[in-house]
Image: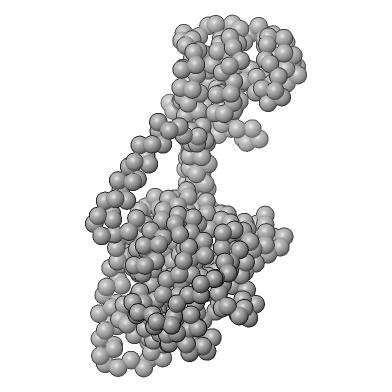
Amino acid sequence: MTNTSKKKGERPTPLPDGIALPHEQEIEKAILAGLMASNRHMPTLAAQLLPEMFTLPEAALAFEAYLNIYNRGESADALSLEKELRRIAPDKETLPADLYRLALGGQYLETGDGHMPTHARHVREAYVARQLMLGCYESTLKAARHDRDTKALLKELDALVGRLAEQLSHATSCVGMKEATPLAKERMQEILRRVAEGHTAGIHTGLAELDRMTGGMMPGTLNVIAARPRVGKTAFALFMALNAARDGHPVCLYSLEMSMEQLMFRLLGCIADIEPSKIQKGTLSATETERILKASEELERLPIWIDERTDLGIADLRYQISLRRRQGRCDMVVVDYLQLMLPPSEERRNTNDQISAITRQLKLIAKENDIPVVLLSQLNRNCEARPTLKNMLSDLRDSGSIEQDADLVLFLRRLSVMNIDEDPETRLSTEGRGSVSIAKNRHGEPGEVRFVHNPGVTRFADDRTPLPPRAHRPAKQELDKDLFG
């Protein structure tokens, strides 16, 4: 066997002498013998193997023929197999007879139903190992060149690992209850332990009532925070990030709108309870300056990373998060904000298609890395003209796919920004108050959470103010039909 890549359309990459690629040729013979003995193995094998995963050329051709027949819904008897082999390999007249000799010449021919899934797994793992060796060696050669692009090489290597991990796990993506139940029990015990210790099931948001209704920012979820400009969605997301970091969860902030300096001033203002504008304008008093310096000492120790690039694309974001996750430097991601992100290069048609492609990729990023992704989004302008002042899922700007891909949709509202002095529902002053409307909650109940905030809109807390007696909800309330969409 030669030390070359089996992938079609690529130049073989030779390995140095003394390094052999792994293979499972005896198992390949056993698989071939099993296919010749019975068709019942084909559904199992078709779900796990591809022809290029075989190192024996004859076995690869035979499996390609069996796979073609299986995909057509036909029965693969000896005659149909021979006919298909002649179609795909007309120059190999003796191939059918060679296959029988090859299969019967194997040393280990356990071909029962219990053996075939294991055989397929071994062949698949050997294939992935070969591709990993070849890919790494090719990257090594590129890295040794004087004109190397180290950053591009790291991206290539990360993409290779991602593809191979996907290929390796593809065969076991369908999990039975025997495997799934222990995992669910383990996760349940972890949640119970966290709750018993006074934590939330997910990552703490900073608002106890919001945590109660949502469980916090849960792993593997896409969480959308939407609002009109000036309401404070960036400030609220930073507040959540700060609380997560204080609990020991590394947070990655990707800001396409604000500079790192602006974000730092906001974080410092949140810790010191000082308006960020005072830092920006240099109007701090001596006491406030001391508080800011003390806040900076805490901020230096927090596991928060900021990326302020304005040309951030979803592919680069996926690579960065995957890398940081493996390094143990990312438990939560905040992206500010959706409408400023660059779409995938193949999705340049219209705004809706672009936004759909981005939100789908962000959901995959959350799922692949088992972390919550917090995504900020704008709302349509016409929602301000609605008499009820309530937001609906259809208000999400540019695409209906946002609400489809999101696990949690939160609408942030501050009536004081709209020059409304008294909340018509609670009869309370709107100064220093706001609400988070849970419009979609895949893991719990919808509802509304009231909060209070400081003058700089950097700190948030649960609003414990008792409602006046008149502030009862109407007996009959029209439900938003989009709420359960």
Measuring from the top left, give residue 369's x and y in whole percent.
44, 50
Residue at (40%, 33%) from the top-left corner?
A: 179
Residue at (36%, 60%) from the top-left corner?
A: 203
Residue 290 visible here: yes
Measuring from the top left, give residue 43's x and y in whole percent.
58, 23
Residue at (58%, 9%) from the top-left corner?
A: 37
Which of the pair 370/388 is nearer the observer?
Answer: 388
Residue 149 visible here: no
Which of the pair 435/151 is nearer the observer?
Answer: 435
**Residue 169 appears left or right of 242:** right
Which of the pair 429/461 is nearer the observer?
Answer: 429
Residue at (55%, 34%) from the top-left corner?
A: 13
Measuring from the top left, give residue 346's x and y in whole percent.
67, 54
Q: Quadrant of residue 293?
A: bottom left
**Residue 205 appears left or right of 364:** left
Q: Is residue 125 above or below residue 243?
A: above
Which of the pair 427/420 is nearer the observer?
Answer: 427
The colour scheme used here is one colour
Q: Is residue 306 above or below residue 127?
A: below
Q: Quadrant of the C terminus?
A: bottom right
Measuring from the top left, give residue 210's x and y in whole percent.
39, 66
Which residue ends up furthest to the front in the rendered image? 475
**Residue 444 appears left or right of 42:** left
Q: Is residue 79 above or below residue 121?
A: above
Q: How many marks?
A: 0
Q: Quadrant of residue 456?
A: bottom left
